[in-house]
Amino acid sequence: MELEKKADHWDIIKPLRARADDGKVGDLISQITSARIQQFVADDHGDLRPYGLAEPRGSITLFDQAEKKDQKVEIGESIKVFGREDKGQTLQIGGPATAGEKEKDQIYVRFAPRGSVYTLPKKTEEILNTKPADLRDNHLVRIDTNILDRITIDAPGKGKTILARKDGNWTIATRNNAPANSGAAQRLIDTLQNERVTGFVEDVASNLAKYGLDKPQIQLTFSSFASENTAETKAGDQPFAGIAFGKPEGDKVYARLTDEPFVVAVRRVLLDQISPDPLQWQELSIFKFKPEQIRRVNVTTGKELSLERDEKDQWRWLKGSGQINQANVQSLLNALSSLHAARWLGATAPQQGFEKPRLVLAFTTSPDNKASHRLTVGAQNSDGTWCARVDGREGTFAMSDTDFNALKLPLEAQAPASPSTTTPVTSATP
């Protein structure tokens, strides 16, 4: 078995090519480099057969960056099986020490740079039992966030969404770089980086149709982006990682990295976080005003009420009567001016109840009342949120019940209840 470190990560090179778990490889190397010599037995120029080192049971060879461009570790029956001429530091493992009772938990080893035979704790030989599966990285994908500029989500028949990173935030490139929900984009990256496969299904994906990977239901591509040609790169997307998701089976779904031959299984619920609908990637902020910027408000629930600010910046009725409930008006303005979606639901649909809205709220934000906005709230969702939409913006979003209640507060002050009158009762004197 051969492992190689490139940049910051380890890979298995032989007997198969696969990503290695950096932590597990680090532990393996630590076992070797931290092993303490128990006894110096002899130099290695004589007969090595008594120590089982004439034909060692196995060997571990370490190459550092000064000897190779990248670090390597080789574990095998003998370094000769690799046919290498590279100079590494080789530890050969022989037979169990038999000199006496004290040495029964020790093994003979030969470390070529020292030119001697000595003993190490017997547990050191367990390294030779290491299998590729023991060191394999079971993370679904490695994403280099330092060079990540674009995420492409492609679902056949459902279109393609491209998320682009710009100045630390994310935009929807396929919707004229409209602001995206940067928090959701980062959660997707974090989820994929932390996702571990539930099983390695095949190491050679010879039958992709069996797993629905010949025609994936959804594909993710991670790219860097160059706006113009340079000596190193051409302008445009430079993909560096990709994931294809095939057919689901029970609580798992089959997947494959585009640059690896393996088929793996991952949790089926992972797909719930990868929507190909660009509307669901919109930023959550609906309105970005200050409460004092709102000049006129028209609210329709069971009836229609309308208010506007006068020359002294005080509210007055355009449609309504009685005293204005100033506290409720301020609560409405606070909720409305910084309204956020709980999440985006996607395209507007009939079942969302906008034909018979529960609330319609129109308002203006300029002194001449020309900058107008309109919010419509339809049916309630099963989780307690409400379907809502705004004019001039495509799609339906989920509004929290707290915001909905603040927007439909009564704006007319309730008249105080008149004290009840009671007729005195005269008791008869016995």
Image: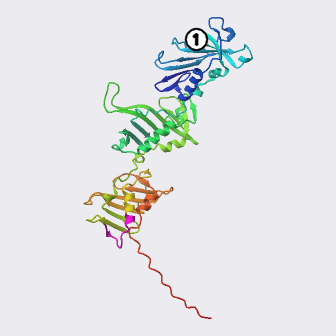
Q: Is residue 379 left or right of residue 304?
A: right
- Number of dots carrying numbers: 1
Front residue (pair 16, 422): 422
- At x 58%, y 19%, the residue is 75
Q: Position of residue 269 (x, y in %)?
A: 53, 43
Examine the image and state in which quarter residue 335 appears: bottom left
Q: Quadrant of residue 354?
A: bottom left
- The amino acid on which the numbered mark 1 sits, given as a three-letter code, is Arg
> The magenta stretch spans which residues?
315-329
Frontmost residue, 297 versus 348: 297
Judge left or right: residue 85 versus residue 121.
Answer: left
Residue 370 found in image quarter: bottom left
Magenta span has 322?
yes
Q: Quadrant of the N terminus?
A: top right
Q: Quadrant of the C terminus?
A: bottom right
Q: Is residue 143 visible?
A: yes
Q: What element does badge 1 sit on?
A: helix
> Per the image, is 218 magenta?
no
Is residue 276 at least partly visible in the picture? Answer: no
Vertical placement of residue 91 versus 316, above or below: above
- Tell me the residue at 72%/17% (across/down): 102
Q: Residues within 10 Å of mark 1 (few under 14, many from 20)?
A: few
Percent across and percent down for residue 183 are 43, 44
Label 1 sits on residue = 114
Q: Residue furthest top?
A: 46
The answer to whether 81 is drawn above or below residue 409 in the figure is above
Residue 263: percent from the left, percent from the top? 54, 32
Q: Is residue 313 left or right of residue 74?
A: left
Rendering coords of residue 114 (x, y %): 58, 11
Q: Is residue 422 left or right of residue 374?
A: right
